[in-house]
Amino acid sequence: MHEANVQADSELSIAPGASTAQRDPEPIVKPPLWITVLRNPLVRILLFGLVVGLIDFAFHRYWPQPALSENQQMALGVDRLLLRVVRGLIPWVVGYWVLVRLIERRPLHELRARRLLPDAAKGWLLGTAIMVSTAALMVAVGVMKIEVSPGPVHLLGTLLVMGLAPGIGEEIFARGVLYRVVEDGLGSWWALGISAIFFGAGHLSNPNSSVVAAAFIAIEAGLLLAMAYAWTRSLWFCMGLHAAWNFTQGGLLGIRVSGFEVPGLMRSTPRGAELLSGGSFGAEASLLTVILCTVLALWFARKAIADGRMVRPYWRRPRREWPASRAGVMEARAAGSQAAPRAAIAADAAV
């Protein structure tokens, strides 16, 4: 199993026949101390949380909105719900922009505008296929009954918005911040485990949740989405996958989404062993979903390893590749920009 050895020297092409002096590695450019501290993974996560918290506090003071239940949100209508979702996402989006552009001082390779449509569409198709396949498997095994009956077609737009909200917000934090920043310091495998655990634990407070349901989400969704990001290095792909997962599961199939009951075009009723049906929490608490998503996560891992996109922990990398000077190397490579990391290091040294 090969992990990426992200070497800055390899990012410079040397013409055939170049002199020996030209082939000598460039000296390590050490960034100032304040940048080294600022780029520390833990400091970056804390600063992101601080920015989000400050913006959210300001919004609560000058743009307040009442807490609403799922049913109350669906009663708002698409336009008012969309405004509510945008208001809720602004702190996360701005916080991520500040983290990447001002602290890490690099382009947003993982959120490039030209990759929005193709990557989000691929993720959406995969998320839809996962939930349709899971539902078909549960029906075949006999632990789910799905009735095709006239559903609330007028609510499809609302359900779509409700699926997009966590698909965007949770991916910004879980993969864009937690996975990516931890990976920058501890490497891909540690980031995979830590981000999956936090992602699963974040669902413990959901209706009808349990330790088993949270553990299953950590495995099936936490590992799958993290490995999908490790290979694609695209948050658009993960957002599309996550949003389609929610919308297809609830809005189309009528299956509970992470414990929340959602009116869908179809009516789904779990039956039989709760370990296989997911019970009142939904398909995400089913062992069948875990098996299907784990197989897919392993496929993503294999692709990421083969393409050299897994990152070693900092103590197994040359000093020039330590977190303070290598933020975004994998994202830059996946986006086709090989010179960006070296340029960022030089810019830091000039501060």
Image (cartoon, grey):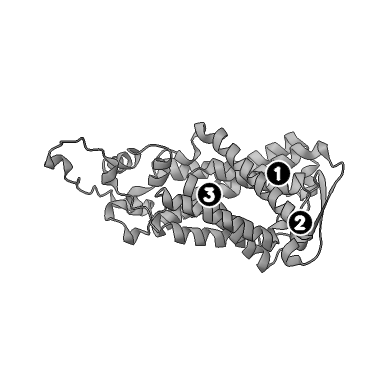
Residue drawn at point x = 70 percent, y = 40 percent: 161
Residue holding disc 3:
228
On residue 140, the disc is: 2
Amino acid type, mark 1: Met
Helix, strand or loop status at disc 3: helix
Quadrant (top left/top right/bottom left/bottom right) for the N terminus: bottom left
Instruction: Describe residue 40's horizontal placement relative to residue 297 as left or right.
Output: left
Residue farthest toward the front in the current orientation of the protein:
140
Q: Position of residue 181 (x, y in %)?
A: 44, 53
Q: Position of residue 127 (x, y in %)?
A: 64, 46
Residue 165, by quadrant, is top right
Q: Residues within 10 Å of mark 2 (few under 14, many from 20)?
A: few
Say which label, 2 or 1, has the lower sequence index.
2
Res. 97 visible in picture: yes
Residue holding disc 1:
162
Alpha-carbon span between mark 2 and mark 3: 28 Å
Front in this rendered view, residue 21 or 144: 144
Residue drawn at point x = 80 percent, y = 39 percent: 155
Q: Residues within 10 Å of mark 3 (few under 14, many from 20)?
A: many
